[in-house]
Structures are given as C-alpha cells and as structure tokens.
Amino acid sequence: MKAWEKNIRKVVPYVPGEQPKKANIIKLNTNENPYPPAPGVLEALKHMDTDLLRRYPDPTAAKLVNAVAKFHRLDSSQVFVGVGSDDVLAMAFLTCFNSDKPILFPDITYSFYDVWADLFRIPYEKQPLDENFKICSNDYKKENGGIIFPNPNAPTGVLKPLDEIEEIIKNNSDVIVIVDEAYIDFGGNSALPLLEKYDNLLIAQTFSKSRSMAGMRIGYLLGNADIIRYINDCKYSFNSYTMNQTAIELGVEAIRDRAYFEQCTQKIIDTREWSKKEFAALGFTFEDSMSNFVFVTHPKYSAVEIFEALRGADIYVRHFKSPERISNYLRITIGTKEEMETLFAFLKQYMSKE
C-alpha cells in the first residue's frame, strides 16, 4: 500500500446493468421503457434555444419543480429534483440518515442502498424478505436511524399494500422513512396521500421508467417542506447546478403529457400480464410483479445457462449472482409485445432441445 492510500475512502461500488454497444439487440436487462418519450419532449428538443447551453441553468430548476408539483397536486416547496433517482436518493441518505443507529432496508432490494450507506459511513442492517419475497413489517419496528425500501420492491417486483406501508411510517415517527417508488406507475397505489398525515415520509420517483427518460437522468423527492429544504441545503453545499438546461426543459414536457404517460404505462402493464401467462406456461415460477419487469426462476433450467443462451442470441436480461437466494432467478424487463414474443419463441426453442 502506498503511504497516501491510508487516507483514501474505499467502497465496493454499485454495478449497473450491462449497456451493450451492439445494434439490433433486444434489451430487457435494465428496466428501460421500450416506447419513446412524450411527443412534446421531441418537439422541445427540436426547438430548444441553443443559447441556453452557454449559460448556467437555474440552480433551483424551478420550471421542472413546478411542473412536478402541479402533476402531483403539491406545493413546489414539497419537491426536490435531481439527476435521476440515484442522485436524489444519495442526497436523502446524506441529509436524513445522520444517526449512530443503523438504518434498515431489505436484504434483497436495490443494491445501491448499502453502497451509499458505506460511502457516507451510515450504519445499516438488512432485514430478510420472507419466503415469498415480501417485506416483513415487524422487522421495521425496532430502534433505527431511518428506513428505506422500494415499492414495488426490486428486483422482485413485489408490491407492499399501502396500509402496511403506513404501519411502518406510523411506528417510526422519530426517523425519516423513504419509500422508493421507481416502479409505482406500473401497479399499486403511491404513498403520496400519506404525505398529509406524516411529516417523516419521503417519496422518491423517477422519469427513467414510466416516462421513457432514462437517458436524461431526472428523479425527484416528494415530502414536507422542511425536509425538502434541508435536502436542498445539502445539495447547494455539494453542487448547485445538478440539473442541466436540456433535462429541465424536456422534463417539463414529459410530465405535462398525462394522457401519453397513462397510455404507455398501460401498454406495458398489458404486455406484462400477457407475459406472466407465457412464463407460467413454460414452467417458470415468479411472484406477482407490479413493476415493468418479472423476476422468474425455473425448476428445471439454470438461470445462468438461460442467461448465457439468451445473450448469445442478442437478448439481454439481468442475472444477479448474489445473494445466493436469488442466484437462480432472472429479472426480465417488459419490452414491446414483439420483443417479448421473440423472447418466448427463443425460450420455447431452447427448452425443446432437452
């Protein structure tokens, strides 16, 4: 070890899903939306004032904040925006989880949570999902420094009912509870109505999934004005200009078009429900996913072998080597109906060889 290395902060980084550089692939590994952004986004991009690119963006991103607030019928003081939900969640960790007590989150969940906790030196404890991959509310009733979990959970897709979420929030009034709703638009009810009752609740959402804007990196937090102000204080102490001009302008157009948003999410939901029947017919088992992906396993075929066979056919899905409990599962994003038909045609051919 070099002498200066003893002062280096070292963490095990988050590993994002593979982004293949090949053309003509079917990409079902990173939960992207298979449909284009709202028409207004493309129009705004065509007619954008390029003079804006030489100027610093509005550090408050007020135009986008106001659009998000209007969509959710909240006051602008209750909205924080950032560079994807990863950015806003990292700011929430930094701001809200500042206790000697451990924060709590599921053992099978979004794998960035422990990375942020390690990076910011936040103690944490992972709470095991039950045998059906469900979050056990009783595990979150013990003393802690904060709580975070996705709903629906990732990579399982399992949705926790709103009354059970409220139970967790209500029993932890002395800490911040973050509900990560990256996939809520594909099924279930948002915890948004609970903001009126609980001042310790933060909700994270993103433009990456249901709004087809993963490449623009836009995420946001919803909460009471005091928490949002504290998070903004940390943001301005870290980087004043997190949102670029293009993201602000296009983000406004993306959230304005409610009809297009609902149309696209419904197409994904319909394809997901059809895909569940196809997976079941092939012998796969899975929990009832309410997200834009299905988390499947097969009693006869190895997940690793299916993963590699699909990859060889330029069909990309996601396999997690750890924890061991999910090492024989594949997370498969719901693509277009045509993409899913190609996937199932391959799987049928693959299984017919046995």
Image (cartoon, rainbow, N blue to C red):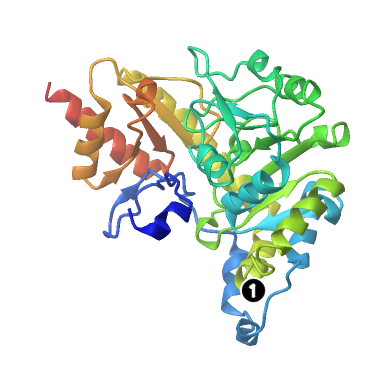
Note whether 22 is above or below 94 in the view shown: below
| Left or right, residue 252 beside residue 158 | right
Quarter of the view holding residue 245: bottom right
Report whether residue 75 is seen: yes
Q: Give residue 342's position: percent from left, percent from top.
A: 29, 40
Decide if residue 338 is on the left or right side of residue 50. Answer: left
Which residue sits at x=64%, y=59%? 254
* Count of numbered circles on the image: 1
* x and y, in percent, of residue 59 in the image: 73, 70
Image point (44%, 30%), residue name? 294
To which quarter of the image does residue 331 belong? top left
Residue 321 image position (x, y, % from top left): 32, 32
Q: Nearer the viewer, residue 50 or 7?
A: 7
218 relative position to 352: left or right? right
Give the residue type that dot 1 points to.
Gln
List the residue tagged with mark 1.
245
- Nearest the camera: 85 or 2? 2
Where does the image place residue 318, in percent across and percent down from the top left? 35, 38
Quadrant occupied by the C terminus: top left
Q: Count residues near mark 1 (Cα–Cα under 10 Å), then give few for <14, some for 14-19, many for 20+.
A: many
Q: Residue furthest front?
A: 3
- Indicate whether 39 appears above or below 352: below
Q: Residue furthest left?
A: 353
Q: Secondary structure at mark 1?
A: helix
Frontmost residue, 233 versus 31: 233
Q: Is residue 8 visible?
A: no
Q: Residue at x 23, y 16 (%)?
A: 300
